[in-house]
């Protein structure tokens, strides 16, 4: 059901490259759209939603919540797309554009400039930007009223790579529906295990996310022989789908691990998967602020993560998670075994996670966007953001207690000159 839009509400166009990968695979941005956009509409924002690419198989996730997205479906860099957006702005009398994705940002900047309305750009990761796109983005950065980044590392990457004006940038962390996640029944875990043939006594190490090189699945697979040598009941659960699946299968065959791994493909109930997992691994090579981290914390699942980006900003080593050196399979194995085998450490992490995740409730995120939209629509300065102090990560991160893991160097996003 579509929420009633009140008179005087800010009229906002949310524009992004695509809803998800055209193969049907969804990713973190998809989950952002599905979680945040309906709540903005419910709060009274007069919201229009559009994507540059064609319709996605999962777009029904928005339609079911009363949002009918527009898919322009024009070819790559078709200049007519800017005209499409300009016409939409005029027809809907749009006051603010909120955009994401590099092509979405570039297109929104031009359309916003033509229409004379402010643009908010939203950056979610530290992915490399091609030279052909990097220079136009640098040149047009002055056409952006505000840059949002999901972590300080993403903000640093944007300042270095895209020459974003740090005086017009703000860290706006992702939010999750904490209480809704916690309503996932405990019984969902055993049911999930039974469905996928996982034994009750298995120690399940789970990784949740798109199967892409940047997510570090290969590091986790390389860590598994050392884990199994110490914990024979360990089982690797890989949740998600993506282009890396053939390569991961080949690596599993090479290491003789096919009998110790379960692929679920893309699933809709992440909560049930988390209930089935004993420890969540996040071995990303680069990372903004992944939903899987916050969801695991909300459901009391300890996280072992690479010391990079928003992961290192959120996790306080051995207090609400465990960090390890990026790409170090040996260190990852030791960290996983420490969490699996140390009940006290696990309980400490769970308690810390419960406190941490309360700061990531979705309501705070939506309220901040609401404030920004109305300020820009009214031609007023945006009120200062609430003070956010990320976790102070020791440098280097100390070893996991009881292990021989060496100190961990925290990595930041690899920017480009």
Image: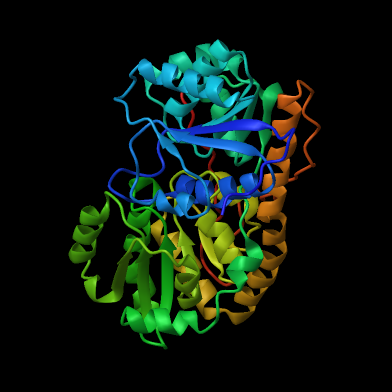
Q: Quadrant of residue 90?
A: top right
Q: Nearer the viewer, residue 238 or 374?
A: 374
Colouring rule applied to residues: rainbow
Question: Looking at the image, which residue is at 60% across and 65% down?
Answer: 297
Question: Looking at the image, which residue is at 81% across and 32% down?
Answer: 383
> Tag count in the figure?
0
Give how far across and how far down residue 49 sits, in percent: 51, 37
Q: Nearer the viewer, residue 259 or 196?
A: 196
Task: Tell me if residue 151 comes above or below residue 180 in the rendering.
Answer: above
Task: Tell me if residue 146 comes above or below residue 69 in the rendering.
Answer: above
Give how far across and how far down residue 298 sits, in percent: 61, 66
Going by the image, does 410 lie left or right of 258? right
Give how far across and how far down residue 187 sits, in percent: 50, 84
Q: Nearer the viewer, residue 213 or 328?
A: 213
Going by the image, does 120 lie left or right of 23? right
Residue 318 seen: no
Q: Quadrant of residue 238?
A: bottom left
Q: Nearer the viewer, residue 142 or 78?
A: 78
Going by the image, does 11 lie left or right of 8? left
Residue 408 seen: yes
Task: Tell me if residue 59 comes above or below residue 194 in the rendering.
Answer: above
Quarter holding the N terminus?
A: bottom right
Give how far across and how far down residue 124 sits, in percent: 53, 39
Q: Quadrant of residue 155?
A: top right
Question: Looking at the image, which residue is at 55% across and 47% down?
Answer: 409
Going by the image, does 166 lie left or right of 139? right
Question: Looking at the image, which residue is at 35% across and 45% down?
Answer: 56
């Amino acid at each position: 059901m579509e929420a009633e839009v009140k008179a005087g509400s800010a009229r906002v166009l949310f524009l992004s490259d695509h809803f998800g990968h055209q193969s049907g695979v969804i990713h973190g941005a998809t989950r952002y759209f599905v979680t945040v956009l309906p709540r903005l509409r419910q709060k009274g924002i007069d919201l229009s939603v559009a994507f540059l690419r064609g319709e996605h198989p999962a777009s029904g996730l928005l339609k079911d919540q009363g949002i009918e997205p527009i898919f322009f479906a024009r070819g790559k860099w078709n200049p007519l797309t800017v005209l499409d957006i300009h016409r939409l702005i005029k027809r809907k009398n749009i006051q603010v554009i909120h955009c994401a994705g590099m092509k979405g940002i570039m297109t929104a900047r031009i359309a916003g400039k033509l229409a004379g309305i402010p643009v908010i750009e939203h950056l979610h990761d530290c992915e490399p930007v091609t030279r052909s796109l990097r220079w136009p983005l640098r040149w047009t950065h002055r056409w952006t009223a505000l840059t949002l980044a999901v972590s300080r590392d993403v903000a640093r990457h944007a300042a270095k790579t895209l020459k974003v004006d740090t005086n017009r940038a703000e860290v706006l962390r992702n939010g999750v529906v904490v209480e809704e996640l916690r309503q996932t029944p405990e019984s969902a875990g055993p049911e999930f295990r039974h469905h996928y043939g996982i034994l009750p006594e298995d120690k399940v190490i789970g990784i949740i996310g798109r199967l892409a090189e940047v997510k570090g699945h290969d590091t986790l697979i390389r860590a598994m022989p050392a884990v199994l040598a110490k914990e024979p009941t360990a089982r690797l659960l890989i949740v998600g789908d993506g282009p890396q699946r053939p390569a991961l299968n080949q690596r599993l065959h090479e290491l003789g691990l096919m009998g110790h791994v379960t692929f679920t493909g893309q699933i809709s109930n992440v909560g049930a998967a988390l209930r089935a997992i004993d420890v969540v691994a996040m071995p990303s090579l680069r990372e903004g602020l992944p939903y899987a981290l916050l969801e695991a914390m909300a459901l009391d699942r300890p996280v072992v993560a690479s010391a990079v980006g928003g992961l290192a900003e959120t996790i306080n080593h051995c207090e609400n998670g465990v960090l390890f050196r990026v790409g170090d399979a040996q260190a990852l194995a030791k960290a996983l075994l420490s969490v699996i085998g140390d009940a006290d450490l696990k309980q400490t992490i769970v308690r810390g996670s419960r406190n941490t995740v309360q700061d990531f409730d979705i309501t705070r995120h939506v309220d901040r966007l609401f404030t920004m939209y109305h300020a820009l629509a009214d031609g007023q300065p945006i009120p200062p953001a609430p003070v956010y102090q990320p976790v102070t990560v020791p440098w280097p991160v100390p070893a996991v207690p009881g292990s021989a893991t060496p100190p961990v160097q925290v990595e930041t996003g690899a920017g480009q000159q």
